Amino acid sequence: MNTIYPELIFTKNSFRLSRKPIQGVFQVILFFGLAWLLAGCGNQDASVAIATATVTVATSLPPEPTATPTSTPTTEPTSTHPPTQEPIATPTPMPTPEIDSEAQNFYYKGLTYAAAGLMEEAIASFDQAIALQADYALVYLERGKLYMEQGQLGQAKSDFQYALEFTTDPAVKGEIKSLLQQLASVPTATPILQADKATPTPEVTVVIASGPPIEAQLGQPVSLPLGGTAHFEEANLSVVFQSVLEDSRCPRDIECFWSGQARIMIQAQQGETAATAFELNNNPPLKHDTISYAGYDIYLVQLDPYPETSDQPIPPEAYQATFVVNAK
């Protein structure tokens, strides 16, 4: 008698699986379930069939696939830290001279006058600023521009050179160099020896000034006529405008190859000590416009009047020298 089950055919002597493979746990469960069923019926031939089926199944099942190990790509670890860079050197700032507040006020006042077209007032304000602070580069720059507009090229060049020496600002230096190049490109008249055109001024020596002295204050400009005296009470100091040694400044009506200079003689005296004579020069690049005496600096701001023409000498009584005295 034949017993037929799905996918499995049993005969009297043997059994076989269909060609469709049965995988995994389902195959094992089905196999042992059928074995138990046949054993329960007591059929010895079935037991032999089971043993034969065991060999048949073992030989007919396809081999288990061998898993091929997948190689894991090796990647370099990515650092979360930014790459190390060389530190960027920070340039050391150049020291900037401290600007006196009053000198700065005169500087802005000069700019205001210049914007309004009041050139003489602007130059006078710039003169006051320089009198209070002799290393104020921007004042020299702006005053030089005014001189350049008025055709006083020698004075403009002197101011530009002075500004270039005192400034540490690269932008300001670039502007000054550009202005100096413009001055160099301006055609000049036939050079005139300033010694031949110097204003003939007789030397006047004054040891004791006539008339009462002018009371002055430290840090404030004071103007003295030739032979005049300024007395600074808080310093117990007197300054006398003694004489004009040379006035070779380039007159306004001509163009000169240099701005010329004015040299004067002063006397300084403190208390009852003997008076000491000093020479001052108004040409800034020469650095002879300031002298030191008894712990004070005496600075020549300017000498007036400025020569207008080469054929009109300035009379001695017309001269006025402006000074500023500061404690060191």
Image: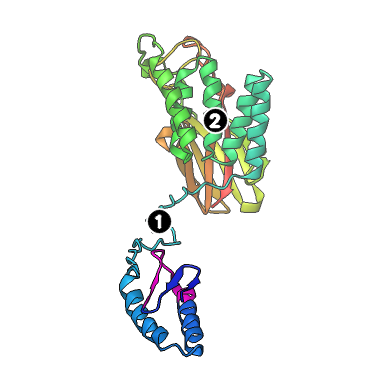
Quarter where residue 325 is shown: top right
Q: Are marks 1 and 2 in contact (CB under 8 Å)?
A: no
Q: Callout 1 environment at 10 Å: few (<14), some (14 to 19), or many (20+)?
A: few
Query: What number is the disc on residue 302?
Result: 2
User: How crowded is the residue under tag 2: few (<14 C-alpha within 10 Å), some, or many (20+)?
Assistant: many
Picture residue at 43% right of the left edge, 13% below the top: 255
Q: Secondary structure at mark 1?
A: loop
Which of 216/243 is in front?
216
Residue 187, image x and y in percent?
39, 10
- Kindly tell me whether residue 210 is visible in this rendering: no
Q: Amino acid at mark 2?
A: Gln
Residue 125 showing in the rendered view: yes
Q: Is residue 60 above or below residue 117?
A: below
Q: Is residue 167 left or right of residue 76?
A: right
Q: Which of the marked residues, 1 or 2, is nearer the chain's N terminus?
A: 1
Closest to the observer, 287 or 166: 166
Relative to 86, is 270 on the left or the right?
right
Q: Which of the two residues, 271 or 6, is positioned nearer the viewer here? A: 6
Q: Is residue 200 above or below residue 59?
A: above
What is the three-letter code of the residue carrying label 1? Pro
Report x, y in % for residue 74.
34, 62
Which element type, helix, strand or loop, lies under badge 2? Answer: strand
Which residue is more in the foreground, 155 or 28? 28
- Identify the residue position indicated by label 1 in the image: 87
Instruction: Calculate the distance from the C-alpha at mark 1 to the C-alpha at mark 2.
Output: 51 Å
The magenta segment is: 14-27
Give percent across and percent down for residue 196. 37, 15
Task: Please indicate whether residue 95 sits to the left or right of residue 55 in the image.
Answer: right
The label nearer to you, 1 versus 2, is 1
